[in-house]
């Protein structure tokens, strides 16, 4: 038995690891990622021939709108990759289980708090247990099978998806209203004062001659980020870089510096200094271009009387218009922007 977490690793990698030598995967999760494209791209490196999926389809539940996209993407990717599948429903499901099998015999499994979503597998603080006892895993499979409904046929799945999509066209899902109520400020200042000197910066990606177009994306893992010829002495490991695209001025995501800065010898680039950053919200970076989170919008949504930049106590980001490769933000404004990114998913 081994304890897993999303702190030092992530469940996405752990699930890939248990698939080595397997030909079947059993996914048990009430919530699912809406697009399985990236997951199936990773499966190309494995010998998976069948995937069993157990999830929920609760009547009158807003999750049905997302589940329609999930099931369509899952079935389509199975078909494209010549992987057979079966879909089961358990509307009382709350547990999350992932089991790899070979010729019907379980090899390894994960029992966890993590849903099969991008946030659950990669960024949320989740913990789970890796089990390699085949007997225990087979008992677990039998328990799941005893409470799930029989496998949905292809025609039933198609009918479910069509019915949800038809309803959503007539009655589009309404976003829950956002309220302006904060409580984290009561304890976050004390925490940072005692345990952290983390700094926050906003940083452009791309240049005016080569803007960051809407068909481009930053890495959902480790991203190399560059600075101009003057060493970015104020940026160090542990700091957070909130990135936006030159051209659209839309937010691309936010990253924790894990290496650097160091100089790229022999380069003719105008941006020879580099750091490596860990993406702290991969799900957002995958779909950044679908949100209207521009520099002007994030400033307008903040109290203009409160400084947003650290060094000059300014209340705007005009320095970015004049070629600055970064601007240090106040912690309060940085948390405001990070909240916008997280709430967009």
Image (cartoon, rainbow, N blue to C red):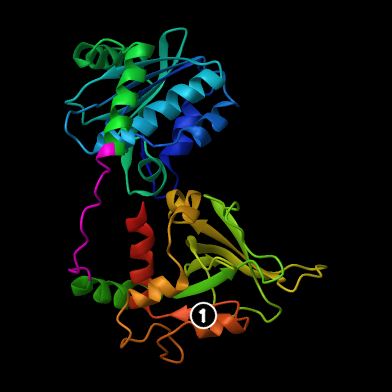
Q: Quadrant of residue 293?
A: bottom left
Q: Residue furthest top?
A: 103
Residue depicted at x 46% and y 50%: 282
Task: Please provide percent x and percent y for residue 123.
Answer: 39, 49
Rendered-image quadrant of the N terminus: top left
Q: Quadrant of residue 184?
A: bottom left
- Over which residues does the magenta segment extend? 170-184
Which residue is at a point 36% across and 12% down the rendered structure image?
A: 155
According to the picture, the residue beneath numbered tag 1 turns out to be 327
Query: Residue visible at 39% across and 77% down?
Result: 299
Using a 10 Å C-alpha cutoff, classify the residue at mark 1 as few (fewer than 14 neighbours), some (14 to 19) or many (20 or more): many
Q: Residue furthest front?
A: 170
Q: Residue drawn 79% across and 68% down? A: 265
Q: Percent x, y for residue 18?
A: 47, 26
Check if residue 93 falls in the magenta segment: no
Relative depth, front residue between 211 and 87? 211
């Amino acid at each position: 038995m081994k304890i897993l977490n999303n702190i030092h690793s992530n469940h996405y990698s752990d699930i890939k690891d248990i698939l080595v030598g397997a030909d079947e995967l059993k996914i048990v999760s009430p919530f699912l990622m809406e697009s399985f494209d990236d997951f199936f791209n990773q499966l190309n490196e494995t010998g998976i021939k069948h995937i069993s999926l157990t999830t929920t389809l609760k009547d009158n539940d807003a999750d049905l709108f997302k589940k329609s996209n999930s099931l369509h993407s899952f079935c389509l990717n199975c078909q494209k990759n010549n992987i057979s599948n079966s879909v089961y429903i358990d509307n009382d499901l709350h547990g999350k289980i992932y089991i790899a099998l070979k010729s019907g015999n379980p090899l390894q499994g994960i029992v966890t708090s993590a849903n099969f979503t991008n946030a659950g597998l990669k960024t949320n603080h989740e913990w789970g247990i890796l089990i390699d006892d085949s007997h225990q895993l087979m008992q677990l499979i039998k328990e799941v099978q005893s409470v799930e409904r029989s496998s949905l046929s292809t025609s039933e799945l198609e009918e479910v998806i069509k019915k949800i999509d038809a309803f959503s066209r007539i009655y589009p899902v309404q976003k829950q209203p956002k309220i302006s109520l904060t409580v984290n400020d009561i304890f976050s200042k004390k925490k940072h004062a005692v345990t952290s000197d983390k700094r926050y910066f906003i940083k452009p990606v791309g240049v005016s001659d080569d803007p960051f177009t809407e068909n481009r994306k930053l890495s959902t893992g480790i991203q190399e980020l560059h600075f101009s010829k003057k060493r970015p002495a104020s940026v160090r490991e542990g700091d957070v870089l909130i990135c936006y695209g030159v051209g659209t001025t839309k937010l691309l995501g936010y990253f924790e510096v894990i290496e650097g800065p160091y100089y790229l010898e022999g380069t003719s680039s105008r941006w020879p200094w580099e750091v490596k950053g860990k993406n702290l919200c991969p799900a957002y970076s995958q779909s950044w271009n679908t949100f209207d989170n521009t520099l002007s919008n994030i400033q307008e949504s903040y109290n203009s009387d409160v400084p947003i930049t650290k060094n000059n106590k300014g209340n705007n980001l005009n320095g970015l218009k004049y070629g600055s490769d970064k601007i240090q933000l106040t912690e309060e404004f940085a948390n405001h922007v990070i909240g916008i990114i997280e709430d967009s998913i």
